[in-house]
Image: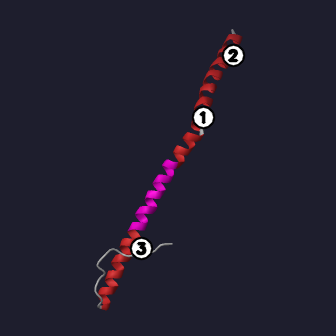
Amino acid sequence: MRRIFWIGVGVAAAYYGSKWLRRQREKLTPENVAARAAERLGGVMELVRVSVEEGRRAAAEKEAEIRTSLGDRPPTGPPARRSS
């Protein structure tokens, strides 16, 4: 009776172990790794984009405030972009 029990335990362990290994192998395929990395990077890039836009807006507001305090007329268009 003990042998049958341990054979059953071994078969169950082999079945669930192979299932787990298949899932891990699927997660680590190059396509899935690349997709997960792109998904995470997309969120970071959105944060950077929003931060840059906010910085530009704040700089334009401050420039307008300074120009007004100095008596100059405010610029008529959006701030000029500097190329790097």
Q: Which residue is under mark 3? A: 81
Looking at the picture, does residue 84 appear above or below residue 21? Answer: below
Which SS type dominates the magenta stretch? helix
- Residue at 38% across / 68% down in the picture? 54
Q: Which residue is under mark 2? A: 6
- Residue at 55% across / 45% down in the picture? 34
Q: Which residue is under mark 1? A: 24
Residue 58 position within the rendered picture, expressed as x and y whole percent measured from the top left: 37, 74
Give the residues in magenta.
38-53
- Residue at 47% across / 72% down in the picture? 83
Looking at the picture, does residue 58 appear above or below residue 34? Answer: below
**In what quadrant of the picture does the N terminus appear?**
top right
| Mark closer to the chain start, 1 or 3 | 1
Is 22 on the left or on the right of 79, as rendered? right
Residue 14 position within the rendered picture, expressed as x and y whole percent measured from the top left: 65, 22
Q: Which label is found at residue 63?
A: none
Q: Answer whether residue 40 is magenta in the image.
A: yes
Q: Measure the C-alpha gap from mark 1 to mark 3.
A: 47 Å
Question: Could you tell me the amino acid type at mark 1?
Answer: Gln
Q: Measure the C-alpha gap from mark 3 to mark 2.
A: 73 Å
The secondary element bearing badge 1 is classed as helix
Question: Could you tell me the amino acid type at mark 2?
Answer: Trp
Is 2 on the left or on the right of 62, as rendered? right
Crowd around label 3: few <14 · some 14–19 · many ≥20 (10 Å): few
Question: Could you tell me the amino acid type at mark 3?
Answer: Arg
| Mark closer to the chain start, 3 or 2 | 2
